[in-house]
Amino acid sequence: MLADLGTYPFVRLDEARAGALARGIELIDFGMGEPREVTPEFIRRALAAAIEPVSTYPKAVGMPELRAAIARWIERRFGVVLDPDREVVPTLGSKEAIFHLAQVAGGDAVAVTTPGYPVAARGARFAGMDVLELALDPARGHLPDLGALDPARLDRLAVLWLNYPNNPTGATIGLDDLERAAALARRHDFVLACDEAYSELWFEGPPPASALQLADRTNVVVLNTLSKRSSMPGYRSGFMAGDPELIAALRRYRPNVGVAPQDFVQRASIAAWDDDAHVEEVRERYRAKRDALLPALQAAGFTSVGGPASFFLWLRTPGGEDEEACAMRLLESGIVCAPGSFFGAGGAGHVRFALVPTPEACARAAARLG
């Protein structure tokens, strides 16, 4: 199975980065979508205060206090009241939850979008399922055409993955489109899984919507994480929420794989979910970095074709240049980005910049592009 999957795309990027460093090139790294903002001090204090002299295994269902804090945030942010005991389960970030979901759902195929985050497809293949790729249509705001799917294929699905705000395009989705997808999930009895890891990061327009706002959440599960919202990637803390029957199945599955965050991380997570002021500061920093870098990229011949959210810039390469050749050319100038092909066939002819370096580094990159 591992041999069939090949090397994870970002491992290849790591290898190219290491080669450039060995040649003495100073790098400004926009490749991995790993936040490098300082984790707020009050969260770090909460983590330190929660470390006990005796360490115990965390419960797979998470602390009741954490589930309650997540439910409070969902109510503040989306106006939705959830039962923290029946509709919420904490996760070890969102990556492991995305990978494992195919193990829980019935069916023999998983649908993923292209371009898209590669982990959902890899998790499906590890579960022995077929992968159906749905192209994101730039003319429709980087949304898939779900109406074009054959009903017989929909009947085979275990999971349909949607990711909005989208990685890598930065596109958002409206509640009408989410409702259409949820209606298909109910009709054909598959799981609509919505990865909303970037829900708190947007550059302009209204706050992104959530599938948790749907009136009927049957067969719907939403994933979110503190990695981006609260600059906590190393804490690995997130959640899944939605249909109580799905959450009950996840609660039965998860003790078998031991993926609950440590108790002290859960205590820090409670502090993070209960505070919204620091999130606005994070959002403004990403906006400032976009404003510093995007004009220089456009002046260098790149075309911005992405949406208004996440912390990614999705760009068409100058003059239709091959995306991997473009990324390697920029690497020789000390600028690291991810070729669009890392995110599937739909990424051909594009590159992705993750706005994770400091504002000062973004300004230096803009000068190099100039």
Image (cartoon, rainbow, N blue to C red):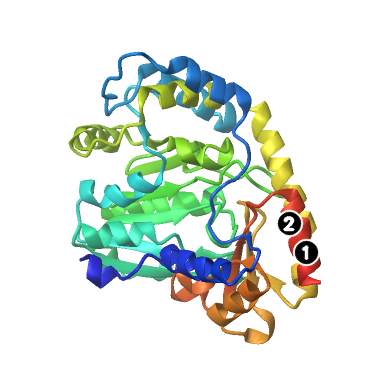
Front residue of 116/259: it is 259
Q: Quadrant of residue 3?
A: bottom left
Q: Quadrant of the N terminus?
A: bottom left
- Mark 1 neighbour class, 10 Å CA radius: few under 14, some 14 to 19, many 20 or more: some
**Residue 283: mark:** none
Q: Is residue 369 left or right of residue 224?
A: right
Q: Quadrant of residue 290?
A: bottom right
Mark 2: secondary structure: helix
Q: Is residue 126 left or right of residue 75?
A: left
Amino acid at pointer 1: Ala
Q: What residue is at 67 percent from the left and 55 percent from the top?
A: 308
Rendered position, 220 above or below 81:
below
Rendered position, 46 above or below 92:
above
Amino acid at pointer 2: Cys
- Which residue carries the number 2 mark? 362
Q: Quadrant of the C terminus?
A: bottom right
The percent coordinates of residue 137 (x first, y second) are 53, 71
Q: CA distance from mark 2 to mark 1?
A: 6 Å
Mark 1: secondary structure: helix
Q: What residue is at 38 percent from the left and 36 percent from the top?
A: 242
Q: What residue is at 58 percent from the left and 74 percent from the top?
A: 350
**Residue 366: mark:** 1
